[in-house]
């Protein structure tokens, strides 16, 4: 089981054997730019790739980065997923592949693409592009088939040896003890029986782990006998209905209920459980894994099998609450979901990490086949979409409350599930899709998913008639995303449309939203007077809207920015201080961080660099909590200017360098509101004069090359280095 730590997932179970494969991978990663590990599902490609990447990471100046492709149903989110994996949150109008190639152009890193078999063509094309333009890039891929990319070096991953080496037996024993520290192979005959189990399972790690999980209900000897009976059954085709008998839709055992007739094989290409390149590749081991999964399925209770199937629409890690929302119904009450979930954990079908759960892709695919055979695929997708529409509603309502940060993270972490839900709603419930795209779009814009925010908002508008607040929200999302991409003409267009729509609908929240969009656009295009006048007028018109409304707080922010731009610094400081207090009372972080930004800028313009640095660091701490790379880039520029104004030239240069690295993450040159430009230039000249051009450049390059988190941590330290 794995959880994210740094750029690579964390290993949280023992790693067994594979010395020869690791040595071969070490050579491959040293001498080749693209290596693909191939092998059937469950053979251990992911664990081997992770161990090899972790061992190699220190050889790459920019580290090793991991992209899990298994949740992707098609290639629409391939580029965003890879971009997220390497830390790129592009805010420009460029083609995504162009932005990714530029971001990776000067990097020296290892990129791991895990589970690429269902996206072989798109992955091959993408890798051809980025390997050509990024000469310091190396790629490690796991797949059930080679990608066919030029220069690809293929390494086959065999099962663990079962004769003459202890690896398979060691894995069985380790997983036995992981489930129950008191368990072991101490009873007479246990070790021989375990060795026979590993031999029957042909050393396939996933099959061995599933078998070890069955020990809770059998002794090792009984398990060996039962597995032998299953594997020796004449004429058995694993995964065929009737292979283990049936007792009804929810009570069927083993692989019963899968498509086809008794003894029938699945059609080629119907599942990622199918063979590697064709029907002749590793057919015996393929059948072995299917048999092992089917046998594990047989050990589950009927309700555990039903939950197994119903969990499969989930793309990302989930908690028990989501499992209940997506899976409860019919014989599975919410309480039964909880019990069945713990049963699947005990059977190693579902893996647990704290209060989060996940299912291996191979086991998810098996469950999907069951779901289809039960005739529940559409109902399960409906429940999944309904659950994540509910999440979008709760996140939208909780935006200005004390849980804003946790909602921000939840929306970010469930991105692939939200996209899957939106795709389903666009096909089957247009009104639901329009509501969802409008409610989640601002989160996505803030998280850096600008292309997805614009794409889904536009598709939702185009899908059918939409009236009222849903229409205003969709237009607003389109405008905000365009604004963040510096597409000011489009932002201005949608600001006007939002205003007209909100006036027609008499929607005060919509009016505030439209004014924020139009006001920030005017500020960025040099029209602060117009922005201030409009914001004040609309705030007066909408006094009935609660003071802690997100749109009201953002509209107040426009007045602060405009007053600063107009040089009315005392008024601006008072307005920013009042706004910050209002945000603090409600637990709102996003607007508060921009109030801090303005307070930092005002203090700098007033000649108070120490106060400016304090406010800038407050902004950066908030933006870091929100994972907002764009906001961090803004804050670092301002902090560097405040440090330079205090005479710490080298420290300012390093912070400028870190800021430049963050600007590259979002695809923009250094920028901010127009009034920051001259201040930044003046302070940079001060920093150069304080330490000299050579020392300044060294410090700048250090900040630029630092790990982003390291650079940000250094910037947040308050002691001056004069």
Image (tube, rainbow, N blue to C red):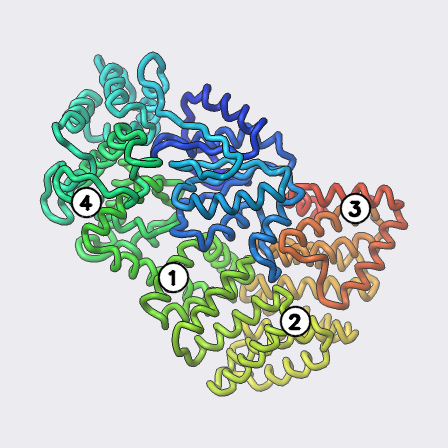
- Is residue 563 or residue 293 the one in the foreground? 293
Q: Residue at x 59, y 73 (%)?
A: 490
Crowdedness of circle 4 by 10 Å Cα count: few (<14), some, many (20+)? many
* Residue 131 x/y as whole percent: 58, 41
Q: Nearer the viewer, mark 2 or mark 1?
A: 1
Q: Which residue is mark 1?
A: 423
- Is residue 236 or residue 265 the one in the foreground? 265
Q: Is residue 287 visible?
A: yes
Label 3–label 4 contact, CB within 8 A: no
Of pointers 4 and 2, the one earlier in the residue sequence: 4
* Residue 509 x/y as whole percent: 51, 78
Disc 4 from disc 1: Cα separation: 26 Å
- Is residue 256 or residue 658 the one in the foreground? 256
Does dot 1 land on a helix, a strand or a loop?
A: helix
Disc 1 from disc 3: Cα separation: 48 Å
Of pointers 4 and 1, the one earlier in the residue sequence: 4
The picture quadrant where one finds residue 240 is: top left
Of pointers 3 and 2, the one earlier in the residue sequence: 2
Quadrant where the N terminus sits is top left
The picture quadrant where one finds residue 120 is: top left
Q: Which residue is mark 4?
A: 258
Q: Is residue 227 above or below residue 618?
A: above
Does dot 4 land on a helix, a strand or a loop?
A: loop
Q: Residue at x 45, y 28 (%)?
A: 155
Q: Which residue is mark 3?
A: 651
Of pointers 2 and 1, the one earlier in the residue sequence: 1
Q: Is residue 145 above or below residue 215?
A: below
* Residue 588 x/y as whole percent: 55, 64
Disc 3 from disc 2: Cα separation: 32 Å
Q: Which residue is mark 2?
A: 578
Disc 4 from disc 2: Cα separation: 63 Å
């Amino acid at each position: 089981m794995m959880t994210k730590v740094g750029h690579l997932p964390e290993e949280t179970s023992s790693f067994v054997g594979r010395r020869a494969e690791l040595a071969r991978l070490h050579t491959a990663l040293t001498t080749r730019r693209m290596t693909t590990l191939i092998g059937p599902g469950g053979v251990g490609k992911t664990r081997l790739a992770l161990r090899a990447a972790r061992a190699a990471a220190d050889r790459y100046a920019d580290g090793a980065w991991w992209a899990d492709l298994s949740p992707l149903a098609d290639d629409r989110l391939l580029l965003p997923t890879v971009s997220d994996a390497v830390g790129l949150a592009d805010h420009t109008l460029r083609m995504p592949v162009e932005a990714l190639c530029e971001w990776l152009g000067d990097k020296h890193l290892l990129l791991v693409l895990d589970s690429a078999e269902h996206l072989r063509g798109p992955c091959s094309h993408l890798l051809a592009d980025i390997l050509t333009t990024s000469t310091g890039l190396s790629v490690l891929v796991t797949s059930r088939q080679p990608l066919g990319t030029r220069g690809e070096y293929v390494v086959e991953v065999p099962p663990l040896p079962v004769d003459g080496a202890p690896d398979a037996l060691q894995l069985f024993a380790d997983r036995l003890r992981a489930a129950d520290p008191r368990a072991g192979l101490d009873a007479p005959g246990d070790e021989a029986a375990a060795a026979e189990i590993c031999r029957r399972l042909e050393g396939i790690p996933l099959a061995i782990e599933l078998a070890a999980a069955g020990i809770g209900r059998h002794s090792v000897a009984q398990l060996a006998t039962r597995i032998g009976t299953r594997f020796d059954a004449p004429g058995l085709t694993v995964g065929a209905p009737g292979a283990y008998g049936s007792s009804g839709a929810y009570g069927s055992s083993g692989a019963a209920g899968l498509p086809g007739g008794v003894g029938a094989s699945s059609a080629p290409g119907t599942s990622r459980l199918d063979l590697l390149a064709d029907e002749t590749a590793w057919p015996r081991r393929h059948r072995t894994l299917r048999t092992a999964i089917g046998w594990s399925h047989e050990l589950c209770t009927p309700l555990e099998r039903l939950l197994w199937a119903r969990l499969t629409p989930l793309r990302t890690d989930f908690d028990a609450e989501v499992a209940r929302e997506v899976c409860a119904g019919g014989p599975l009450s919410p309480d039964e979901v909880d019990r069945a979930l713990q049963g699947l954990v005990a059977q190693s079908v579902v893996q647990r990490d704290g209060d989060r759960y996940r299912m291996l892709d191979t086991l998810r695919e098996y469950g999907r086949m069951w779901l289809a055979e039960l005739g529940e695929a559409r109902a399960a997708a409906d429940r999944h979409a309904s659950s994540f529409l509910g999440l979008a509603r709760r996140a939208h309502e909780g935006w200005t409350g004390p849980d804003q940060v946790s909602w921000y993270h939840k929306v970010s972490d469930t991105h692939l599930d939200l996209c899957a839900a939106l795709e389903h709603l666009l096909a089957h419930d247009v009104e639901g899709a329009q509501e969802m795209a409008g409610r989640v779009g601002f989160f996505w814009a803030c998280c850096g998913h600008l292309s997805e925010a614009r794409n889904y908002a536009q598709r939702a508008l185009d899908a059918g008639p939409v009236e009222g607040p849903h229409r205003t929200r969709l237009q607003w999302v389109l405008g905000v995303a365009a604004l963040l991409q510096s597409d000011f003409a489009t932002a201005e267009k949608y600001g006007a449309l939002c205003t007209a729509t909100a006036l027609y609908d008499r929607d005060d929240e919509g009016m505030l939203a439209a004014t924020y969009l139009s006001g920030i656009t005017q500020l960025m295009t040099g029209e602060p007077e117009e922005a201030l006048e409009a914001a004040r007028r609309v705030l007066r018109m909408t006094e009935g809207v609660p003071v802690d409304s997100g749109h009201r707080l953002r509209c107040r922010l426009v007045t602060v920015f405009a007053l600063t731009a107009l040089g009315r610094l005392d008024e601006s400081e008072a307005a920013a201080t009042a706004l910050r207090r209002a945000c603090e009372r409600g637990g709102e972080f996003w607007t508060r961080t921009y109030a801090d930004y303005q307070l930092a800028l005002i203090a700098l313009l007033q000649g108070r660099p120490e106060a400016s640095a304090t406010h800038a660091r407050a902004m950066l701490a908030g933006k870091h909590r929100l994972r907002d790379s764009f906001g961090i880039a803004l804050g670092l520029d301002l902090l560097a200017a405040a440090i330079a104004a205090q005479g710490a030239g080298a420290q300012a240069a390093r912070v400028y360098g870190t800021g430049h690295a963050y600007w590259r993450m979002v695809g923009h040159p250094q920028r901010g509101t127009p009034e920051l430009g001259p201040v930044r230039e003046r302070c940079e000249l001060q920093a150069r004069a304080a330490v000299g051009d050579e020392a300044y450049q060294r410090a700048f390059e250090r900040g630029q090359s630092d790990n982003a988190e390291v650079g940000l941590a250094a910037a947040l330290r308050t002691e001056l280095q004069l």
